[in-house]
């Protein structure tokens, strides 16, 4: 009976949505009904999966017109955008790094769309523009994804993406002259240029079918070798594995070019690792691991020693040492054992090691000898997030530090004296000391203790009436540590609370925390998020009429699942570039790579039913009063294809029985988020924060 009601409701004209003044444009439909294990599932908006069809383009244009007209009526939208630009207009500097006798640093003067790479003859010397990505396009939509310098010092390869796509192009410059060379690689994906000899390795797919560049399934990842001065058509296919078309392959080579690694991933939460001794003529790869649910990351090669960061036998990670001449796992030696905190990174500097640990989602760092003896804890400025950068043969060491109220600051670190000195400190146009962050712990539905950070203006009254922006991710072994965003400032200045919850599915407490939010335990993630909102209400920080929930990608799925499970609990919902169709996600681009976290509808009847039970698209109910919703996506998102958001928004608009608006904002010449020019980020933030603040009853 419920299926029949849903099908009949979806057949209604979009203009008949109950209790709304907005007339939503009708979306193209074809009445598709799929069958899973004998159960019929309606997918009437299937035509929206074709993002290049005339019907989809017309719908996108019409939806954007409705959304733009609505957002333009928010009285303080332009004032908010002006403030967002003001607080974002500050100089940002990266950690400096040395390559072949020259020093380099990325710097953004303030409102530049992309940061510029500068070259220096010495550390702290005069900075010369070496590569300005802002000149690669007129609108900032060509983004620099990475650079790599050849070991002989002659060349720098740089990787770009266009309009936010995951597709990559590789170009090469002569380091001495700055001249752009003829070498140019197309259809690379998930990698960069790995230099070896007079050329480089890169990972790519075959060129996709025209018109389906951003939606077709990517299969059979290949590794090629490009020799400098030759066309891509002459590149040598170095490695492929057609028997495993849904896996990623890449290689890496140490600076001395003595050891090569082959990395295989995509079939689990981890990877397989292969090693090859380049000092031995005719040597072949030796597979040294065979469990793709576990992680094996070589972090340094010193002579015959390979330092490997892994969670094998240590859910909170440890550091092992292997011998390249006899690399079998049975011969590995434990150098740094697992600790109660999560080991997150290892940096080698000046003959020592710096180990970073996460404790309740904040960074603690320690200096070690190369033999594994702890020397001291490194004094950081305060609680927050730090990331170190250094080289084993170089005394200079740097780290970046940030928190919710401290913008990313670069420090130089002297390991001899344990002294940190500011190298680059942003000056942001806001009163930093007016705000405070506290970390609380709340109890989820099953009794699990979950941490959450709260940032707000000092003197906040817990009267149950404060606006809350509740954000989380909860997946793919990704942590959400403290971080600064200038775009939060206007919301905080207006009396809002920024709440960030560290849900299961992330890496905050190691692999066990991650696994507890995957596959048939995914509901734990949604329960954790719902419990965060309930804790904020019960502890008088806010009320259900003052909560906005926001999340992107897997976090977009989080928002979609929670708003369909508890539409009564939130006032505003912002699912951004979200995974909304859990029955078909694996059929597009690299969606299949998410199966280790999600499972797929093809795995089993049990897995299909579990996915359907929380899939945001499949749990929208006609006649339900949903919160004010602004779905965001982009036309070049080939990570989470926009069809997810398209179908979810079209269905939600037809199911909405309450007066709150259901809008979708579809950005053009943009993708999943990486490399988005600052101008587009600010426009989107003005729309999202404006929508949130307007519906939470805030004034600006």
Image: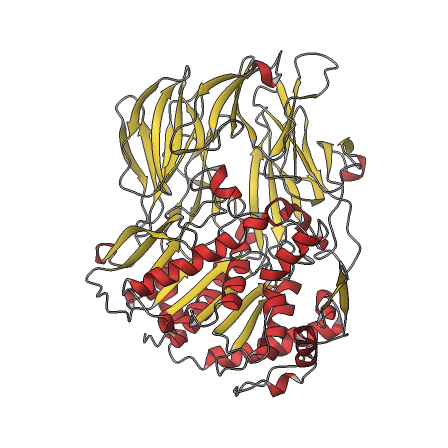
Q: Is residue 362 above or below residue 227?
A: below
Is any part of residue 482 visible from this angle? Answer: yes
| Residue sitting farthest toward the left | 459
Name the quadrant of the N terminus: bottom right
Q: Nearer the viewer, residue 76 or 502?
A: 502
Query: Farthest front residue?
Result: 1
Image-quadrant location for residue 638: bottom right
Quick check: 256 above or below 169?
above
Quadrant of the drawing holding the C terminus: bottom left
Q: Position of residue 541 (x, y in %)?
A: 28, 64
Asked whether residue 485 is in view, the answer is no
x, y (%) of residue 620?
Answer: 59, 71
- Can you give x and y, in whole percent of width and height, for residue 206 in the image? 78, 45
Q: Position of residue 528 (x, y in %)?
A: 44, 55
Residue at point 47%, 49% (across, down):
115
Q: Residue at x 56, y 41 (%)?
A: 146
Left or right, 22 with reference to 93: right
Q: Is residue 466 above or below residue 99?
A: below
Q: Nearer the viewer, residue 129 or 261?
A: 261
In the displayed structure, does residue 685 sit left or right of residue 28?
left
Q: Quadrant of residue 673?
A: bottom right
- Front-most of 6 and 558? 6
């Amino acid at each position: 009976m419920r299926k029949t009601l849903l099908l009949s409701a979806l057949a209604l004209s979009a203009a008949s949505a109950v209790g709304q003044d907005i007339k939503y444009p009708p979306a193209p439909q074809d009445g598709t009904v799929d069958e899973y294990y004998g159960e019929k599932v309606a997918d009437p908006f299937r035509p929206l999966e074709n993002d290049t069809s005339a019907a989809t383009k017309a719908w996108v244009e019409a939806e954007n017109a409705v959304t733009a007209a609505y957002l333009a009526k928010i009285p303080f939208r332009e004032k908010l955008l002006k403030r967002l630009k003001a607080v974002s207009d500050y100089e940002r500097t990266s950690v400096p790094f040395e390559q072949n006798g020259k020093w380099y640093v990325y710097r953004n003067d303030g409102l530049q769309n992309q940061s510029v790479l500068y070259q220096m003859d010495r550390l702290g010397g005069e900075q010369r523009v070496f590569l300005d990505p802002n000149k690669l396009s007129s609108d900032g939509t060509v983004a620099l994804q990475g650079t790599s310098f050849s070991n002989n010092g002659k060349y720098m390869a740089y990787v770009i993406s266009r309009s936010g796509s995951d597709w990559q192009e590789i170009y090469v410059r002569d380091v001495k002259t700055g001249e752009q060379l003829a070498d140019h690689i197309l259809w690379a994906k998930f990698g960069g240029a790995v230099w070896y000899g007079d050329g480089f390795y890169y990972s790519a797919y075959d060129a996709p079918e025209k018109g389906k560049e951003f939606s077709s399934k990517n299969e059979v990842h290949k590794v090629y070798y490009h020799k400098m001065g030759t066309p891509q058509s002459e590149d040598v296919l170095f490695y492929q594995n057609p028997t495993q078309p849904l896996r990623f392959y890449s290689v890496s080579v140490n600076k001395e070019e003595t050891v090569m690694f082959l990395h295989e991933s995509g079939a689990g939460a981890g990877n397989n690792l292969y090693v090859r001794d380049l000092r031995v003529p005719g040597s072949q790869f030796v597979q040294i691991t065979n469990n793709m649910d576990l992680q094996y990351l070589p972090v340094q090669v010193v002579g015959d020693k390979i330092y490997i960061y892994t969670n094998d036998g240590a859910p909170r990670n440890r550091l092992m040492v292997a011998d390249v001449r006899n690399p079998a796992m049975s011969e590995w030696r434990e150098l740094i054992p697992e600790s109660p905190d999560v080991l997150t990174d290892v940096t080698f500097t000046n003959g020592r090691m710096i180990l970073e640990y996460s404790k309740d989602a904040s960074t603690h760092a320690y200096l070690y000898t190369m033999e594994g003896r702890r020397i001291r804890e490194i004094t950081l400025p305060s609680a927050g997030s730090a990331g170190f950068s250094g080289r084993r043969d170089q005394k200079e060491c740097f780290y970046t530090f940030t928190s919710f109220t401290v913008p990313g600051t670069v420090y130089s670190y002297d390991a001899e004296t344990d002294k940190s000195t500011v190298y680059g400190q942003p000056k942001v146009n806001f009163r930093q000391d007016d705000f405070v962050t506290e970390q609380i712990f709340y109890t989820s539905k099953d009794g699990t203790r979950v941490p959450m950070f709260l940032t707000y203006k000092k003197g906040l009254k817990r009267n149950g009436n404060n606006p809350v922006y509740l954000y989380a991710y909860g997946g793919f072994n990704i942590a959400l540590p403290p971080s600064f965003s200038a775009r939060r400032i206007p919301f905080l200045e207006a009396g809002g609370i920024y709440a960030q919850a560290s849900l299961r599915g992330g890496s905050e407490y190691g692999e066990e925390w991650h696994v507890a939010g995957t596959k048939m335990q995914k509901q734990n993630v949604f329960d954790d998020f719902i419990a965060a909102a309930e804790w904020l209400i019960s502890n008088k920080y806010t009320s259900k009429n003052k909560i906005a929930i926001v999340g992107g990608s897997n976090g977009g799925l989080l928002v979609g699942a929670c708003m369909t499970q508890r539409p009564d609990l939130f006032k505003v919902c912002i699912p951004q570039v979200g995974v909304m169709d859990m029955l078909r996600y694996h059929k597009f681009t690299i969606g299949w790579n998410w199966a280790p976290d999600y499972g797929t509808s093809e795995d089993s009847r049990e897995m299909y039913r579990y996915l359907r039970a929380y899939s945001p698209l499949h749990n929208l109910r006609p006649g339900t009063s949903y919160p004010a919703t602004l779905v965001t996506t982009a036309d070049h998102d080939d990570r989470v294809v926009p069809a997810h958001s398209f179908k979810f928004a079209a269905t939600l608009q037809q199911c909405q029985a309450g007066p709150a608006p259901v809008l979708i904002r579809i950005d053009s010449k943009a993708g999943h988020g990486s490399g988005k020019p600052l101008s587009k980020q600010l426009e989107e933030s003005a729309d999202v924060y404006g929508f949130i603040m307007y519906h939470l009853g805030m004034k600006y």
